[in-house]
Image: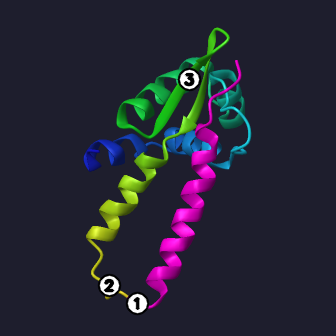
Amino acid sequence: MDAARLFSALANSERLAIVDALVKRSPRTCGPTISEIAGATDLSRFSASRHLAILRSAGLVTAERVRGGFRHRINVDGLTAIEDWAYARSSTVPTADESTYAVQRASAGNNLRQSSLRCNG
């Protein structure tokens, strides 16, 4: 994924609010609709839709058509790409805590990936 595109998509407080709302969503439920996202972020449906299109284009959000609408989810690979970009540029010396970090990262990714289960329409 293109780092500049990822960071550009996140360089807006409304899009960050959408990402935050999607990350906080229970992974056991279908992703929210545009109306639910708009309500959770105090955006109009039009504005939420426009911002979601940018986030999808950057690879940070996915959408699944369900019963005439779309359900939106975080694309864990997009978040991981940002983390990988930052880690690759880190000037810190690896420590013993690195393995703990790797386990925590894998656990967080697995929790978010659970939300990628298909909605039952």
- Name the N-terminal-most of marks 3 and 2: 3
Q: Which residues are magenta?
A: 95-121
Residue at left offset 56%, top offset 71%: 104
Identify which amino acid the numbered label 1 is placed on. Answer: Thr
Rounded to the nearest whole Å, what is the CA distance between mark 3 and mark 2?
Answer: 40 Å
- Name the N-terminal-most of marks 1 and 3: 3
Q: Which residue is mark 2?
A: 92
Identify which amino acid the numbered label 3 is placed on. Answer: Glu
Q: Which residue is mark 1?
A: 95
Residue 8 on the magenta segment: no
98 to the left or right of 1 = right
Q: Quadrant of residue 25?
A: top right
Q: Are marks 1 and 2 in contact (CB under 8 Å)?
A: yes
Q: Would residue 20 be visible to someone looking at this image? A: no
The N terminus - image quarter: top left
48 to the left or right of 80 = right
Residue at left offset 45%, top offset 91%: 96
Residue at left offset 52%, top offset 45%: 16
The one nearer the camera, 19 or 29, is 29
